[in-house]
Image: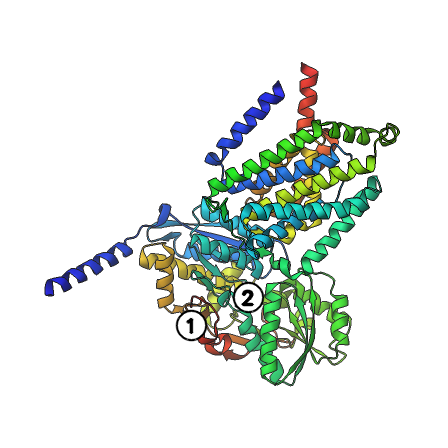
């Protein structure tokens, strides 16, 4: 009996040892970053996200588990087909081990399909849609920075609490806009508010006048902007031109990045409430990292860019610790460890792929309150991760 | 003789290419080569500039994807369904469009294609901006697993060669001769007793069907269909491929497709990634200004001059 036990112990130790010494495939760790380099979302992700990933790799000494780390990047132009084709090629012909960033939900979903077939890690930072950790989830995907659920639970709830109980949505007509609209609708209705209707605009759009007029005519107290990036700033500019706010309606920008505020200027953006996963001016750690980022890119980081750094750094840490770039091994390590860096404190990766961390409800300062460029947010409150993202029980992910 | 040698060399090259080049890229090339060849059938030999071929290409891509993914049809049937749908669409568009010539023909086809595009963007089965994703490649004849890139490549190559042969055969047939007569001088063809509208319509439908075949094939290769396939940019791209390779030559469009696909692929990951449309535009201008017959057209002229 005793011999049997020893034998079993020995065998399991052997198994563990072989797992730990599992080699790095093809002698290098390769990360493929797909982002929007020139379009609607290039400001909030784009070149800045590439810079963030480069910083993460440099900070790891460009090595993980004794093997060189390489970064390849491509512009997916916010198109699902381009993202899928590139991801497939990287996975099959260039030995890419993980895909990163992926702003625009449709591209993230396309890469999820490829990653599922090829069993590769996906570190989603830019895409927001909650289906990524629900119906569309994959075992090797991590939804890192934020989600439409968190945005709804942050901004949506706050606006309803202040008396904004009738809503009309201006929605970007693709997976992300639809998910955001659905998530906010749920929150608004749960709080006793009502949704009067919505209008979908093509993605990306530049002329918002007809959509804004429709919203104006709806009679709703709150016009919810379920879009992002340049679409949001263009919609806000159009709303200003048509005197939407002067007419007594208010705008809820459901997803806004610091780069959008920078583009709009405080004069236009002041008073807007928003939910963010990261703000550069929180503590010494965030400031230190953000200043390095600023030196490199000339801009303060958006939460997507900070999330890219954090997710890539955490992935490399996992490879360093396990000595392997095998997807299942690395995923298991990452799920078991809290994420503690400048971006997230005590963040955890759930089995549905959701990275749960604290979010912040912020208000954009007025020009008088701001001390200069990039001093834009006043943090109103910290939204605990559980409240922002809901619980694992609510997730409809089949593999959770 | 030189032509035959050229085709034999090209065939051998295509057969061994996947050993050296990433097969999916080659399959993309084959799909576009087929698309451009189908387009050339009416532009090069019928003299009709259609600016709406993306509707047939993209429409078939969606129908194929839907047929395979939702209806569960086998791959080969799915692609044929897509091509048939493109043919029907081509018949409807053609009946309206061939009544006019020149710029009016181009504008009618563009308008119809834009209507189709609007349909694709708003119809639920296409997935709108998200596209139709996750189309299974399935098994060829229920036996060969097409998930394997090599198997998929040779299947694509077989379809391409069959369609290419059909196009070459059509061009050299009496039907093709009449088509060329119509292109060069329609009133004379009418005076000779040909019902030119019927010939043009037949060519248009054939071209649309083969464009649809290319679109359906592309869906299976990439396992997705998206709005890019149906956008008017695609109609423009196929014109560019055809002109660059040599309009009115058999092999020209395929060569043009090869050049464009290779360019797009190399530029996309380089420092010029944001400049792809500009680079393609410059190439187009150079082509139109300095070698108007296209690569193959100029080559043929050169051979004719030297021998």
Instruction: Give the chain of mark 2.
Output: A
- Asked whether the viewer can see residue A253, the reply is yes
* Residues marked 2 and 1, same chain: yes
Mark 1, Cα crowd under 10 Å, few <14 / some 14-19 / many 20+, is few
Residue B297 lies, with reference to residue A311, above or below; the image says above
**Image quadrant occupied by the C terminus of chain A:** bottom left
Q: How far is mark 2 from mark 1, CA to CA?
A: 20 Å
Q: Residue at x 55, y 36 (%)?
A: B158
Q: Are marks 2 and 1 in contact (CB under 8 Å)?
A: no
User: Seen in the image, is B129 located left or right of residue A393?
Assistant: right
The first of marks 2 and 1 along the sequence is 2
Instruction: Give the chain of mark 1.
Output: A
Closer to the camera in the image, B200 or B239: B200
Instruction: Report x, y in % for residue A292.
Output: 49, 61
User: Seen in the image, is B6 located left or right of residue A138?
Assistant: right
**Image quadrant occupied by the N terminus of chain A:** bottom left
Instruction: Report x, y in % for residue B242.
Output: 69, 35
* Circle 1 residue: A345
Residue A46 lies, with reference to residue B174, above or below; the image says below
Residue A234 lies, with reference to residue B61, above or below; the image says below
- Asked whether the viewer can see residue A373, the reply is no
* Disc number lying in front (2 or 1): 2
Closer to the camera in the image, B68 or A301: B68
Q: Mark 2: which secondary structure?
A: loop
Mark 2, Cα crowd under 10 Å, few <14 / some 14-19 / many 20+, is many
Instruction: Report x, y in % for residue B299.
Output: 66, 24
Q: Mark 1: which secondary structure?
A: strand
Q: Which numbered disc covers residue B100?
A: none
Outermost residue, left side: A2
Q: Which numbered disc covers residue A128?
A: 2
Residue A42 lies, with reference to residue A339, above or below; the image says above
């Amino acid at each position: 009996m005793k011999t049997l036990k020893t034998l079993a112990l020995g065998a399991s130790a052997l198994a563990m040892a072989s797992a730990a010494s599992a080699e790095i495939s093809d002698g290098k760790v390769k990360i493929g970053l797909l982002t929007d380099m020139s379009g609607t979302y290039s400001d909030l992700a784009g070149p800045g996200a590439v810079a963030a990933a480069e910083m993460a790799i440099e900070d790891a000494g460009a090595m993980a588990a004794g093997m060189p780390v390489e970064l390849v990047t491509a512009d997916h132009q916010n198109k699902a087909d381009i993202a899928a084709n590139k991801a497939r090629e990287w996975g099959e012909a260039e030995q890419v081990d993980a895909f990163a960033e992926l702003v625009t939900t449709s591209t993230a979903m396309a890469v999820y399909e490829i990653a599922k077939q090829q069993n590769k890690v996906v570190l989603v930072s830019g895409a927001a849609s909650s289906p990524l950790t629900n119906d569309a989830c994959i075992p090797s995907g991590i939804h890192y920075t934020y989600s439409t659920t968190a945005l709804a639970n942050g901004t949506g709830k706050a606006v309803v609490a202040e008396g904004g109980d009738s809503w009309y949505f201006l929605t970007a007509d693709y997976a992300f806009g639809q998910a955001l609209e659905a998530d906010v609708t749920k929150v608004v209705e749960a709080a006793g508010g009502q949704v009067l209707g919505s209008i979908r605009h093509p993605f990306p759009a530049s002329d918002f006048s007809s959509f804004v007029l429709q919203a104006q005519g709806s009679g709703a107290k709150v016009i919810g902007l379920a879009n992002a990036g340049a679409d949001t700033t263009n919609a806000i500019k159009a709303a200003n031109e048509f005197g939407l706010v002067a007419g007594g309606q208010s705008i809820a920008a459901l997803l806004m990045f610091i780069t959008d505020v920078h583009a709009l200027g405080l004069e236009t953006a002041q008073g807007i409430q928003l939910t963010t996963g990261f703000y550069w001016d929180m503590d010494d750690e965030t400031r230190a990292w953000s200043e390095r980022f600023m030196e490199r890119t000339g801009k303060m980081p958006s939460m997507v860019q900070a999330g890219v750094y954090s997710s890539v750094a955490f992935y490399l840490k996992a490879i360093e610790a396990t000595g392997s770039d095998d997807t299942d091994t690395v995923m298991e390590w990452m799920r078991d460890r809290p994420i503690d860096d400048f971006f997230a404190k005590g963040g955890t990766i759930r089995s549905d792929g959701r990275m749960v961390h604290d979010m912040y409800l912020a208000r954009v300062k007025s020009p008088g309150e701001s001390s200069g460029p990039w001093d834009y947010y006043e943090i109103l409150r910290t939204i605990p991760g559980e409240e922002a993202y809901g619980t694992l029980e609510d997730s409809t992910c089949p593999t959770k | 003789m030189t032509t035959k040698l050229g085709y034999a060399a090209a065939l051998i090259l295509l057969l061994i290419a996947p050993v050296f080049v990433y097969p999916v890229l080659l399959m993309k090339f084959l799909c576009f080569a087929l698309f451009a060849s189908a387009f050339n059938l009416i532009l090069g030999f019928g003299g009709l500039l259609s600016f709406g071929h993306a509707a047939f290409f993209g429409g078939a891509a969606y129908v194929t994807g839907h047929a395979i993914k939702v209806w569960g049809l086998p791959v080969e049937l799915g692609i044929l369904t897509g091509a048939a749908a493109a043919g029907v669409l081509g018949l409807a568009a053609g009946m309206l469009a061939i009544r006019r010539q020149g710029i009016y023909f181009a504008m009618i086809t563009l308008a119809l294609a834009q209507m189709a595009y609007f349909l694709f963007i708003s119809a639920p089965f296409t997935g709108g901006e998200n596209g139709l994703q996750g189309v299974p490649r399935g098994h060829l004849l229920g036996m060969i697993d097409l998930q394997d890139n090599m198997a998929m490549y040779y299947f694509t190559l077989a379809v391409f060669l069959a369609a290419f042969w059909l196009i070459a055969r059509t061009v050299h047939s009496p039907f093709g001769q009449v088509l060329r007569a119509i292109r060069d001088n329609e009133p004379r063809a009418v005076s000779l007793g040909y019902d030119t509208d019927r010939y043009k319509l037949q060519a248009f439908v054939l071209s649309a069907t083969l464009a649809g075949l290319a679109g359906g094939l592309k869906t299976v290769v990439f396992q997705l269909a998206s709005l890019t396939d149906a956008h008017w940019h695609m109609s423009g791209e196929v014109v560019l491929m055809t002109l660059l390779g040599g309009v009115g030559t058999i092999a020209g469009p395929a060569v043009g497709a090869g050049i464009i696909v290779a360019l797009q692929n190399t530029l996309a990951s380089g420092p010029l990634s944001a400049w792809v449309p500009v680079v393609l535009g410059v190439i187009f201008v150079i082509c139109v200004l300095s070698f108007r017959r296209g690569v193959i057209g100029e080559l043929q002229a050169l051979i004719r001059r030297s021998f």
